[in-house]
């Protein structure tokens, strides 16, 4: 097993720090240049090391981009999960919507990283991985029994995506107000 294939826990402190540095450099490069415009050479230059040093830690561009995608996704999921867990079950959907939109507003590079990874197939994903956790949050809120939770979760996700995309195109767009409006729409499906 090569060094780059070892588990994170087996790496030295220096190796873990270098990998984090490379992941951050990759997020910056993908956010600035897109997936196609990001290269190992650009990542190395941003990190202030050689391309060979990048390859010491990651076997390919796809591997470092995948690690960067996982990094930003983990940060997003952790923040949203904390917000939902802190809310009463009935307020879980609102906490999900506001924290998801808020995180992506506050971290536009993460938004671009997620978008680029998903559209360039560097990240394997199933649609159920996105709608199922939200459907569980909706179920805990006690919706009308006639509500199709899968469909409602897909609609909410689409609304979130549209709000975030609008803000990327127009940084002055008020995503907090948009999140409030989406919450108000969703609450028509939930008990008062």
Image (cartoon, grey):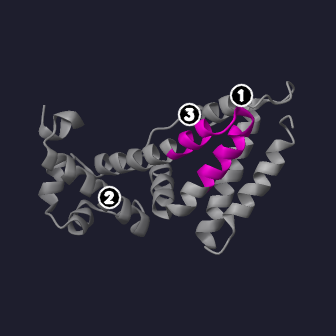
Q: Is residue 37 above or below residue 3?
A: below
- Foreground tag (1 vs 2): 1
Question: Residue 135 at what x, y percent from top left?
Answer: 68, 32
| Residue 80 on the magenta span | yes
> At x 23% / y 37%, what residue is drawn?
8
Q: Residues within 10 Å of mark 2 (few under 14, many from 20)?
A: some
Q: Residues within 10 Å of mark 3 (few under 14, many from 20)?
A: few
Question: Residue 56 at what x, y percent from top left?
Answer: 13, 49
Per the image, the residue denoted by label 3 is 129
In this rendered view, identify the residue nearer to me: 143 or 32: 143
Question: Seen in the image, is 59 located left or right of residue 181?
Answer: left
> Are the residues tagged 1 and 2 within 8 Å (C-beta)?
no
Per the image, the residue denoted by label 1 is 140
Q: Which SS class for mark 1? A: helix
Earlier sequence position, callout 3 versus callout 2: 2
In this rendered view, identify the residue nearer to me: 120 or 144: 144
Q: Which SS class for mark 2? A: helix
Q: Looking at the image, which residue sits at the far top?
A: 145
Q: Residues within 10 Å of mark 1 (few under 14, many from 20)?
A: some
> At x 68% / y 57%, what residue is drawn?
162
Task: Read off the magenta span.
Answer: 79-101
Question: Residue 24 at what x, y percent from top left?
Answer: 32, 58
- Foreground tag (3 vs 2): 2
Earlier sequence position, callout 1 versus callout 3: 3
Question: Residue 72 at what x, y percent from top left?
Answer: 43, 50
Per the image, the residue denoted by label 2 is 24
| Quadrant assignment for the C terminus | top right
Q: Which SS class for mark 3? A: helix
> At x 55% / y 39%, what residue is drawn?
81
Question: Seen in the image, is 138 located left or right of residue 127?
Answer: right
| Residue 42 on the magenta span | no
């Amino acid at each position: 097993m090569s060094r780059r294939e070892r588990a994170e826990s087996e790496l030295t402190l220096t190796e873990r720090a270098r990998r984090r540095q490379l992941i951050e450099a990759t997020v910056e490069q993908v956010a600035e240049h897109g997936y196609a415009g990001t290269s190992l050479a650009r990542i190395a230059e941003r990190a202030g090391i050689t391309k060979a040093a990048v390859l010491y830690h990651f076997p390919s561009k796809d591997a470092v981009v995948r690690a960067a995608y996982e990094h930003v996704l983990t940060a997003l999921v952790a923040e949203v999960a904390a917000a939902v867990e802190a809310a009463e079950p009935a307020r879980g959907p609102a906490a999900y919507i506001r924290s998801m939109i808020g995180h992506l507003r506050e971290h536009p590079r993460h938004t671009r990283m997620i978008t680029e990874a998903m559209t360039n197939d560097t990240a394997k994903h199933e649609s159920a991985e996105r709608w199922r956790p939200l459907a569980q949050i909706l179920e805990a809120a006690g919706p009308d029994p006639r509500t199709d939770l899968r469909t409602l979760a897909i609609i909410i996700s689409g609304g979130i995506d549209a709000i975030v995309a609008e803000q990327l195109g127009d940084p002055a767009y008020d995503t907090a107000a948009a999140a409030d409006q989406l919450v108000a729409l969703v609450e028509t499906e939930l008990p008062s």
